[in-house]
RNA sequence: CGGGGCGUGGCGCAGCCUGGUAGCGCAUCUGCUUUGGGAGCAGAGGGUCGCGUGUUCGAAUCACGCCGCCCCGACCA
């Protein structure tokens, strides 16, 4: 068997990054395009990753005091209008429901004109309005605060340009919505959840990120401040992997979310919202994938250890299978990342070599291959997906069975750690902080890439000082960057306020450092 | 939605300029051989060439319209 791809690799390599990304999504069996424009079918392996993400993040969300609930998919158009009137620029492309019945007219199934809705319904693009409406009824007293709500849901945004996982018309996410008595408490919540995202991304997805504050122009419409975590993909571009917004009293005022304080005065709540989506899976792919396909961090791999029996249609197959079954059940009694190890014994009736490569492409962290020789010697032969090859050859390891079972959890942890370290080295090593003027930035990133579809040369990020201008001055900065296809990702948190030099845009004294990058 | 590219069996492509009724590699199925490894040989199945209209005796091939995908831009998680 041979793949019609260079050097036996499944993906065609990362030199054409967009093509490579699509190849990994396909080869790893994660998702495919659907008949509906811009909407994807998430296949079992891809959805399995999402389920692991959900499970871990949900626990963290609950541990920080939030409760899950569910709000309707349909939002009255007037709710959106209300928000739009208070939040300039909040004009997302949305799907709108206008009828409630189909009718066969002239042989064509179409909306029945008699079933037109009095008020159109919007398929939720985000739920601030409908949740805020409920909050206005739920919050009466300072004793009701803080109100800490989360929901796991799908949302729809009629995006012009879509890419599997990174931007789809419909996507899955969680959205947290909270109401607080004062700004201090709400801001603490905003930063707390940002840090939940940061830690989750780093320790579970093995995807290092920089947490920071967005510039005024990149704020969520209506937010007082927006924070993000930004991850560096293998092509050097930044991916906004999660956001957390402090909304001040803007939404509370628009939706009448207020409470009586201890003095009996009616007071506006301070609200927050925060979310991460299936985009995280795109981030994982572009962070950890290699020329052979996906590499999944063990913490989110639907199957952490896959056992491939070397069956040959011979009498000893029974012994091999029995040995594998015993190994599988022994391994699944072990614990890694606070859960039972997820083991799969692959008994599908295909060639074992094909099975191996299927799991390699999907990114199973550990692939065990058991043949008669292993059975006879009480051995386990395995491959680490994070260190699959030695040069061009596949590297396999042998170990006594009981030792392997005993050390399996450590092995998974080691893989998790190594994937993180690899990504962390790339991130840290490609943030350039020695550039002190705009010409240097332009020079570093070079001219904007042409209209070809090549991935282009790897460029990291630039970290430099600026004076945090506002209004027209900020617009000018944005335009200047846009010409180089650049944007300000965020102003990293926890900056030391040592000598920052001059703003590379205005020449004034810099007040903080920002990250500049090309982005998704 | 603007610019560019593309749409031919599951995947990757050739054919299209110079219309004549579909081909290659991989994958799939069957048989035999092979077996610590992304196997070999032989045979087989699978495509109304994105959709529609037009031109033509005849359209994958030409024209027009539409849809979808990819890249760039605008927009965004």
Image (cartoon, grey):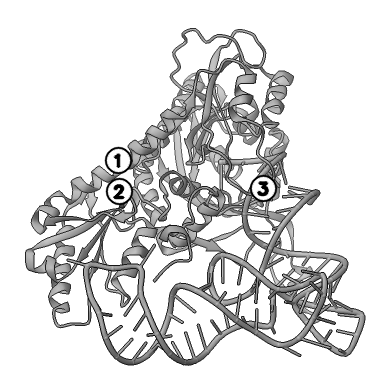
Whether residue A289 sits left or right of residue A91 in the image: it is left
Chain letter behind tag 1:
A
Q: Do the residues bearing badges 2 and 3 touch, measured as CB atoms within 8 Å?
A: no
Determine if residue A270 is in view: yes
Relative to A310, residue A219 above or below: above
**Viewer-nearest residue: A386 or B33:** B33
Instruction: Identify which residue is drawn at 66% across, 17% down.
Output: A505
Determine if residue A215 is in view: no
Percent across and percent down for residue A348 are 31, 74
Report the residue marked by disc 2: A387
Comes first in the chain, label 2 or label 1:
2
Identify the mark at residue A340; answer none if there is no mark.
none
**Viewer-nearest residue: A430 or A25:** A430
Percent across and percent down for residue A171 are 54, 53
**Viewer-nearest residue: A249 or A205:** A205
Considering the numbered disc 2 on the image, is that residue within a helix, a strand or a loop? Answer: helix
Comes first in the chain, label 1 or label 3:
1
Report the residue marked by disc 3: A452
Report the residue marked by disc 1: A418
Report the Cα–Cα distance between label 2 and label 1: 9 Å
Q: Do the residues bearing badges 2 and 1 touch, measured as CB atoms within 8 Å?
A: yes
Query: For the residues carrying marks 2 and 1, which lies nearer the camera in this image?
Result: 2
**Viewer-nearest residue: A245 or A321:** A321
Whether residue A372 sits left or right of residue A428 in the image: it is left
Considering the numbered disc 3 on the image, is that residue within a helix, a strand or a loop? Answer: loop
Q: Quadrant of residue A46?
A: bottom left
* Same-chain status of marks 2 and 3: yes
């Amino acid at each position: 068997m041979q793949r019609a791809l260079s050097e036996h690799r499944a993906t065609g390599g990362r030199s054409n990054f967009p093509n490579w990304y699509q190849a990994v999504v396909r080869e790893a069996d994660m998702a495919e395009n659907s008949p509906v424009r811009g909407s994807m079918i998430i296949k079992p392996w891809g959805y399995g990753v999402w389920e692991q993400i959900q499970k871990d993040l949900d626990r963290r969300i609950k541990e920080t005091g939030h409760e899950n609930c569910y709000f309707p998919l349909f939002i009255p158009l007037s709710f959106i209008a209300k928000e739009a009137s208070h939040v300039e620029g909040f004009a997302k492309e949305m799907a709108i429901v206008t009828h409630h019945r189909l009718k066969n007219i002239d042989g064509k199934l179409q909306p029945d004109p008699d079933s037109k809705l009095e008020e159109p319904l919007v398929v939720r693009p985000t739920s601030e309005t409908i949740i805020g409406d409920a909050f206005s009824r739920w919050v009466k007293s300072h004793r009701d605060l803080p109100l800490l709500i989360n929901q796991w849901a799908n949302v729809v945004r009629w995006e012009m340009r879509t890419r599997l996982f990174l931007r789809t018309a419909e996507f899955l996410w969680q959205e947290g919505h909270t109401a607080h008595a004062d700004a201090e408490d709400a801001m603490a919540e905003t930063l707390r959840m940002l840090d939940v995202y940061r830690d989750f991304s780093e320790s579970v997805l093995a995807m290092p990120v920089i947490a920071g504050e967005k510039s005024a122009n990149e704020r969520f419409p209506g937010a007082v401040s927006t924070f993000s975590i930004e991850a560096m993909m293998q092509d050097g571009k930044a991916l906004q992997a999660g956001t957390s917004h402090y909304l001040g009293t803007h939404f509370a005022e628009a939706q009448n979310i207020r409470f009586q304080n201890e003095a009996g005065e009616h007071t506006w709540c301070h609200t927050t919202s925060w979310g991460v989506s299936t985009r995280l899976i795109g981030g994982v792919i572009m962070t950890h994938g290699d020329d052979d396909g996906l590499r999944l961090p063990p913490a989110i791999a639907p199957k952490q250890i896959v056992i491939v029996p070397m069956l040959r249609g011979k009498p000893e197959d029974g012994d091999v299978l029995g040995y594998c079954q015993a190994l599988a059940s022994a391994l699944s009694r072990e614990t890694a990342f606070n859960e039972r190890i997820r083991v799969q014994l692959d008994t599908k009736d295909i060639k074992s070599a094909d099975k191996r490569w299927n799991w390699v492409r999907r990114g199973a962290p550990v692939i065990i291959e058991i043949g008669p020789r292993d059975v006879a010697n009480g051995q386990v032969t395995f491959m680490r997906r994070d260190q699959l090859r030695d040069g061009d050859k596949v590297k396999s390891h042998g170990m006594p069975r009981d030792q392997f079972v005993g050390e399996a959890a450590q092995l998974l942890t080691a893989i998790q750690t190594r994937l993180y370290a690899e990504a962390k080295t790339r991130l840290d090593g490609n943030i350039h902080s020695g550039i002190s003027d705009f010409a240097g930035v332009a020079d570093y990133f070079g001219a904007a890439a042409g209209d070809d579809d090549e991935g282009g040369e790897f460029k990291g990020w630039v970290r430099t000082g600026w004076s945090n201008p506002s209004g027209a001055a900020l617009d000018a900065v944005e335009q200047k960057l846009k010409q180089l296809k650049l944007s300000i990702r965020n102003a990293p948190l926890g900056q030391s306020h040592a000598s920052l030099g001059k703003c590379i845009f205005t020449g004034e004294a810099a007040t903080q450092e920002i990250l500049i990058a090309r982005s998704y």
